[in-house]
Amino acid sequence: MQFGRAFLTSTLLLATAMPCLAFTHSRRGPTSPRVSSKHSKSAKPVGQRTIDDARATQIQASLIKSGYLSGEASGHWDSQTQTAMQKFQADNGWQTKLIPDSRAIIKLGLGPEQSSKSTGIPAMTVSDVSPTSGFMQR
């Protein structure tokens, strides 16, 4: 009888302890760092990392024409080109990161083409605007 009672007690104890054993592994919240990540090794960087040689040639030619770079366009985004672009952007009050600012590209004449043919809207000239009212006169 004592064996049966001990067996029953140990069985009940084991049965109640089993679900607790299942929850002993660590739980992480959705924002906690993961111990190992399968995707971190194969993740590719997003966005443009370098400037294409053809685009570098265009930018260099415009910087030479603007007087910020001397010599001929090499087609490679080198330190001289970076320095010239930084100076051009600083002179215009823009950021001076190594990546050209979109406003700088547009001011160099290399931005998107804004033709009136593609939009269907006639291009406005300075003579179309009245100096006193600021409205278009046609």
Image: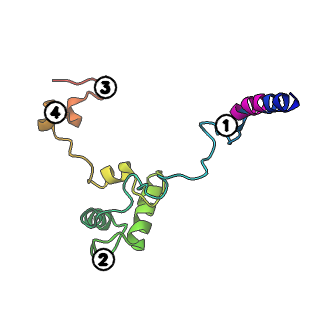
Q: Residue 90 appears at what percent x and percent y?
A: 47, 57
Residue type at tag 1:
Ala
Q: Secondary structure at mark 2?
A: loop
Residue linked to disc 4:
119
Tell me which label, 2 or 3, sits earlier in the chain: 2
Distance (Cα) linking label 3 and label 4: 23 Å
Residue linked to disc 3:
134
Q: Is residue 103 above or below residue 117?
A: below
Q: Which residue sits at x=29%, y=63%?
A: 52
Tell me which label, 4 or 2, sits earlier in the chain: 2
Residue linked to disc 2:
71
Marks 1 & 2, CB-CB < 8 Å contact = no
Nearer to us of marks 2 and 3 is 2
Magenta residues, start to end: 11-19
Residue linked to disc 1:
22
Residue type at tag 3:
Gly
Distance (Cα) linking label 1 and label 2: 72 Å
Q: Which residue sits at x=69%, y=32%?
A: 19
- Tell me which secondary structure the magenta stretch mostly adopts: helix
Q: Secondary structure at mark 3?
A: loop
Answer few, some or many: residues within 10 Å of disc 2's Cα (few below 14, many 20 plus, some between 14 and 19).
few
Marks 4 & 1, CB-CB < 8 Å contact = no
